[in-house]
């Protein structure tokens, strides 16, 4: 993603909040046995909050008394304040609700943000997951490419809400340095903000460097004859199997590059979810083809998306289960 970055750095403090300390008054070794601990991530998927929250969920259960099951769920809204409000007012007060929230949570209460419905002093702060560089970046075609230019020319930037660093920093720079960032608030999280920048809705955005690195698009495959209406299957070996196009083809793509490694034409379009299974150490891929009684309606919808010269007039209803053997590189060479 071609962007230019301004050298703004900040420490990202991720608050893991519990609504009360009373649950920890118990000293039993099985305090959380047979329970589920839920981590509420205050932003949408694809950003650093989501990355850190799911990383914590993967390992935290091993270190809690009773080794409970730990799951992560996204609860975006109001710059993570929605998740904080939920934990404070609605979530269980037994230690099974944890939040990944903004580092400015207490500050939002201090400045009387109307979205705050909690008392930050009653949260139990468990610590921070990681420190990170927060960056502000401008799209490569934006008229503003430096702080000096931002002090002379107005530039619209995306923000995720009053409690989010993406709104706090540009507003702070406007007041302290006299920059002219026009903050467009309301984007759920950094992933949507970056997408808005690529689409031209805004000229810049702010996020952590971790989110920019992990959220960068690796590749894109364009289906020439129709949209891909079918489900995908990703294997542990890095293959992606895709069907669901009106050309009736079933494909295997390289998960790292998007290159089409293999394809074949089936009797009809793929609607079933591809499945993978092993027999005697050999991997097989099974998939259902056949759009049934809805084939005509689905084909009409697909044809509306593509040029007339590439439209398909007939798509058989089908009703076939196909099974393919996955061969290794040595077997394929023979």
Image (cartoon, rainbow, N blue to C red):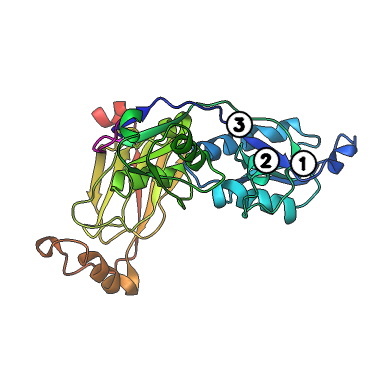
- Residue at 51%, 47% in the rendered image: 44
Residue situated in front as seen by the camera: 70 or 313: 70
Residue situated in front as seen by the camera: 235 or 324: 235
**Residue 121: image tag:** 1
Dot 1 and dot 2 residues touching (CB under 8 Å): yes
Q: What stretch is highlighted in magenta?
A: 139-145
Report if residue 103 lies within the magenta region: no
Q: Is residue 117 above or below residue 329?
A: below
User: Disc 2 designates what residue?
Assistant: 106
Position of 215 compared to 25: left or right?
left
Dot 3 and dot 2 residues touching (CB under 8 Å): no
Position of 80 compared to 278: left or right?
right
| Separation of residues labelled 3 and 2 (CA atoms) | 12 Å
Residue 282 place in picture, x, y as percent: 42, 36
Q: Residues within 10 Å of mark 3 (few under 14, many from 20)?
A: some
Q: Is the magenta stretch mostly helix, strand or loop?
A: loop
User: Disc 3 designates what residue?
Assistant: 13
Residue situated in front as seen by the camera: 275 or 299: 299
Q: Is residue 301 above or below residue 50?
A: below
Which of the 4 image quarters holds residue 41?
A: top right
Residue situated in front as seen by the camera: 274 or 81: 81
Residue 295 place in picture, x, y as percent: 29, 70
Q: Quadrant of the N terminus?
A: top left
> Callout 3: helix, strand or loop?
loop
> Callout 1: helix, strand or loop?
helix
Residue 11 place in picture, x, y as percent: 56, 27
């Amino acid at each position: 993603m071609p962007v230019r970055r301004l050298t703004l750095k900040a420490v990202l403090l991720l608050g893991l909040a519990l609504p009360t300390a009373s649950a920890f008054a118990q000293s039993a070794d099985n305090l959380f046995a047979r329970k589920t601990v839920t981590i509420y991530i205050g932003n949408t998927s694809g950003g650093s909050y989501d990355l850190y929250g799911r990383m914590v969920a993967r390992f935290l259960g091993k270190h809690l008394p009773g080794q409970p099951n730990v799951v992560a769920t996204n609860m975006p809204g109001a710059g993570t304040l929605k998740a904080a409000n939920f934990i404070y007012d609605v979530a269980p007060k037994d230690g099974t609700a944890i939040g990944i929230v903004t580092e400015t949570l207490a500050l939002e209460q201090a400045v009387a943000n109307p979205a705050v419905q909690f008392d930050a002093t009653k949260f139990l702060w468990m610590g921070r997951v990681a420190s990170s560089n927060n960056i502000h970046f401008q799209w490569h075609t934006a008229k503003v490419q430096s702080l000096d230019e931002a002090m002379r020319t107005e530039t619209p930037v995306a923000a995720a809400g009053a409690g989010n660093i993406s709104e706090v920093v540009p507003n702070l720079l406007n007041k302290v340095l006299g920059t002219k960032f026009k903050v467009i608030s309301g984007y759920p999280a950094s992933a949507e903000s970056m997408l808005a920048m690529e689409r031209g809705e805004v000229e810049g955005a702010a996020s952590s460097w971790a989110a920019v690195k992990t959220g960068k698009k690796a590749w894109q495959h364009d289906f020439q004859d129709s949209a891909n209406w079918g489900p995908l299957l990703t294997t542990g070996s890095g293959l992606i199997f895709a069907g669901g196009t009106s050309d009736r083809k079933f494909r295997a793509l390289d998960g790292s590059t998007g290159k089409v490694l293999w394809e074949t034409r089936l009797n009809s379009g793929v609607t079933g979810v591809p499945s993978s299974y092993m027999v005697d150490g050999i991997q097989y891929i099974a998939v259902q083809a056949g759009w049934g009684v809805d084939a005509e309606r689905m084909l009409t919808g697909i044809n509306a998306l593509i040029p007339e010269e590439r439209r398909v007039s007939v798509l058989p209803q089908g009703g076939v289960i196909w099974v393919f053997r996955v061969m290794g590189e040595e077997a394929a060479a023979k």
